[in-house]
Amino acid sequence: MLKPQYSFIVPVFNEEETLPELYKRVSAVMDQMDGPVELVLVNDGSNDRSLAEMRVLRQRDSRVCYVSLARNFGHQTAVTAGLNFIQGQVAVILDADLQDPPELIPEMVGLWQQGYQVVYAQRSRRRHAGWFKRLTAYGFYRILQRLSDVTIPSDTGDFCLLDRQVVDLLNAMPERNRYIRGLRSWVGFRQTAIRFERDSRFAGEVKYTLRKSFALAINSILSFSQVPLRLATYLGLLSASFALIMMFVVLYWRLFSISPQLVGFSIITIAQFFLGAVQLICIGILGEYIGRIYEEVKARPLYTVSEIVGLSNTEDNRRESLPCYRNKDSGV
């Protein structure tokens, strides 16, 4: 069997309703490619029939491969697992809910053939998205651009094409709190965008809830910015300035015997609440960064794998260094 030229990575979590349609549309694109293709499905600890659907697709088409994680590790980790195990010279990452149209892949490949090593899909419009989702997404990307140490394109997701050189660099990064769209910007190389209108989910429930989206936003900011740490310093300076001003105001009242509106208990209460809030914010910011250091120094594997099917074991030496435990019993 020829080694794949292209690898399509699809993280899957409870997508039994979308997998048949996903395969239908992706396989049509695979048939158009100018080289061998593998479709790598990463089961992120699904508790529905997603894994069973993957096994059925594997029996139907030998180009379908899958990696099943031992539990749910999260979307970004599932993408990382796919990048660790692909064999192609080109990786394409897309979501299983079909909000990322597979039909754009040939156009992405065309840009790669022109010399671009990263081609990311940039949303021009979100179809059927509510005003709250559009507003928060717009605000988040603009804030991230302001705070980040690298330029992360706005209105982009994980839907992208990556050259093998970029994939190898991402695999070599040991960090645990991963934000793929930030990491692919950090590595550099020639990058370009392809504009598209994002469709609504094909079926099933939205997996990125408000809580998960907020956690991803916090992760992205802390991973690529030191501004929150500086914010703690600025808040400390602000509180010190506020205290100094209040000292002069109280001294002025005392010297000139002016009867102030805010005296005694009121001033003390306001000052206590203000300083307490500043301290808690600073402690919280420091706690977030210290927590990340704690996660890194434990050096646990990024994920664990229970089943691998369809992926070649000819590169065992390379895979021995991957940040995971796995079952080597692969079906090819």
Image (cartoon, rainbow, N blue to C red):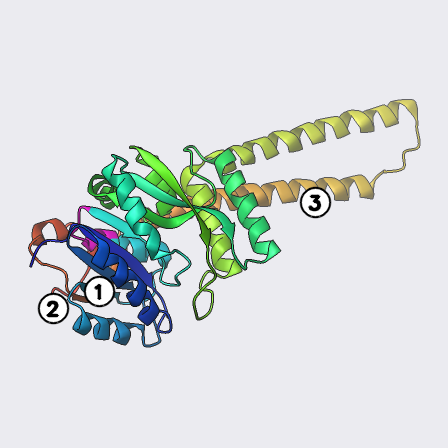
Which residue type carries mark 2?
Gly
Dot 3, how many residues are within 10 Å of its Cα: few (below 14), some (14-19), or many (20+)?
Answer: few
Q: Quadrant of residue 27?
A: bottom left
Q: Quadrant of the N terminus?
A: bottom left
Which residue type carries mark 3?
Phe
Contact check, label 1 and label 2, Cβ < 8 Å? no
| Residue 278 location (% of width, % of height) | 62, 40
Report if residue 84 lies within the magenta region: yes
Badge 1 marks a residue whose secondary structure is: strand
Camera-side mark, 2 or 3: 2
Q: Which residue is mark 3?
A: 273
Q: Which residue is mark 1?
A: 66
Q: Quadrant of the C terminus?
A: bottom left
Q: Which residue is mark 2?
A: 331
> How much space separates mark 2 and mark 3, taking CA atoms?
62 Å
| Residue 281 location (% of width, % of height) | 57, 44
Q: Quick one: label 1 or label 3, which is nearer the N terminus?
A: 1
| Residue 144 location (% of width, % of height) | 49, 40
Report the residue at 93% width, 26% height from top.
Answer: 257
Dot 2, how many residues are within 10 Å of its Cα: few (below 14), some (14-19), or many (20+)?
Answer: few
